[in-house]
Structure formats: C-alpha cells, structure tokens
Image (tube, rainbow, N blue to C red):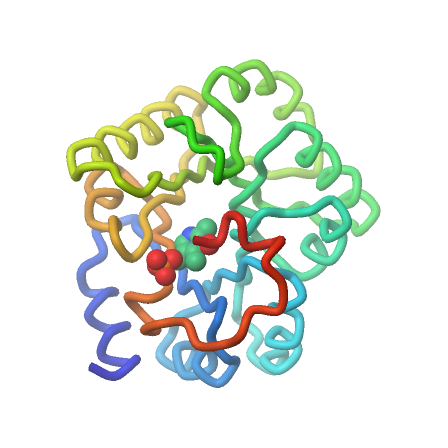
Amino acid sequence: MTLSARWHDLVDRLADGVHLLAVSKGHPATLIRQLAELGQQDFGESRLQEALPKLEALADLKGLRWHFIGRLQANKVRGVVRSFAVIHSVDSLALAERISRIAVEEQCCPQVMLQVKFRDDPSKGGFSQEQLKQAWPDLIQLSHLQLIGLMTMAPIGLSLEQRQELFGQCRELADQLGLPDCSMGMSGDWLEAMHAGATWLRLGSLLFGARSMAKSSSVDDINAV
Ligand SMILES: *Cc1c(COP(=O)(O)O)cnc(C)c1O
C-alpha cells in the first residue's frame, strides 16, 4: 500500500471524535508534505532538534499543527513552546510550571496533556496516579497551560486484556479530572486504545512504515519507543 492508501484506510477506521496524530519522527519533510496534501494537519515529533528543520521546510503549509510527544528536557522547553501547539508528554509538576512560565514570556498558551504511568515502568516518564492527584491543585493554577487531557503508553509485554484495562483506567481518570482528551494507542495497540476511549491515536510505523532517518541523539529517545 502507498502512504496515501494507508492514510485513507486508517482515517476511514477512526471512530467519531478520534483523531489521528501522524507521528513523523524518523521521516522526512517530503512525506509530511504528501500527507498534508491529503488533509492531514496534526503531526507528532519527539525531538526538537530533529523537528525544527522539518518545520522550517514546511513553513509554507499554514494549517499544520505540531504535537510534541517525546521526553521534554528543561532546556528545550522554550523551543517547544515556540513551535508546538500541543505537548503530550508533560510528566512532572516542575515541567508544567516551567512550560507555563515560559508560555507567559512567549505570550502563548500551549495545550498540554499530562503523561501518566498506570504500571511501574522505569523506562518511561510520567506521573503515577498518586502523584498526579497530589499535583492536580497546583497544575490547575497554571494560567498559561490549557490542560486538555492525559497521555499514556502501555508497557511492552502486556496481554490484550491488560492493555484494554490500562487504557480504560486512563479514560476513567481523565473523566474524573474533567479532561476531554486521552492520547493513547500506537501502531501496536491503537484498536484497544480507541475502543477504550482514546481521542488521539499516535501512529508512526503503521502509517509511514519503518522509520528511516538516522537518530542524532539517544538521550531524548528514552520515551520514543
Ligand atoms: C514513536 C512514538 C509513537 C509512534 O510509534 P509507532 O509504534 O511507530 O506507531 C507514539 N508515541 C510516542 C510517544 C512515540 O515516541
């Protein structure tokens, strides 16, 4: 199947209210442009230094919305706030505070999802449910963040039922907190995530095929499975 056929096939299978985030990390701007011509507007990148040249190459496309999905280091916050509309991977109160402070200076209000871990998984960042509930009163005070949802990733090795349960827990917690969005589901588990109430599916390899571009650094990739 061509990229265009894969995109149409996926979009046709999305339930109402579910959005496709095309995860373009590891793929060149030319492929992003092809998808944009079909009508895809939301693209996800996990490393600022990889994303910036692509954003520049695509600056003539006005409707694109960039989503940051990787582990966000403190020294990259300003660059991300300047260029990305949505940040899916806010994994601590300190990071949220920093984003809000810099958003004040940059005069913008990024949309933010809080990354939550529903299972112990030392390889991934994220709030535990406990930590999130503790931080919540402080998080909702941050004036320049638009808190829109939760993001989660299923650890590898879970059974189908365990993944369904995990995604269900994420949907339930988002509902409790009054957050509309759940960013969950990747190429290997997007159907379970969609059935459990995801609103954003983050799909890379299923859409683009295997990632091809060389990685320039591994530090930012801890999250970028
Ligand atoms: C790379 C990545 C994805 C996409 O993964 P695929 O398995 O290629 O669909 C989704 N979410 C995050 C956070 C990623 O880093």
Q: How far from the left and from the top, in percent, is residue 78?
A: 76, 52
Which residue is located at x 20 percent, y 81 percent? Answer: 1
Say if residue 203 shows up in the picture. Answer: no
**Residue 179 in the figure: left or right of residue 86:** left
Q: x, y (%) of residue 142?
A: 69, 29
Q: Residue at left 35%, top 30%? A: 170
Q: Residue at x 32, y 73 (%)?
A: 209
In the rendered image, residue 15, in percent from the top left (x then y), is placed at 21, 51
Pick the front one: 21 or 152: 152
The quarter holding residue 218 reads bottom right
Q: Nearer the viewer, residue 120 or 1?
A: 120
State left or right for residue 42 relative to residue 175.
right
Q: Quadrant of residue 95?
A: top right
Write down which quadrant ligand 1 falls in.
Answer: bottom left
Q: Visible in this render: residue 168?
A: yes
Q: How many numbered circles are shown?
A: 0
- Residue 165 image point, x, y percent: 23, 29
Residue at 73 percent across and 58 percent down: it is: 79
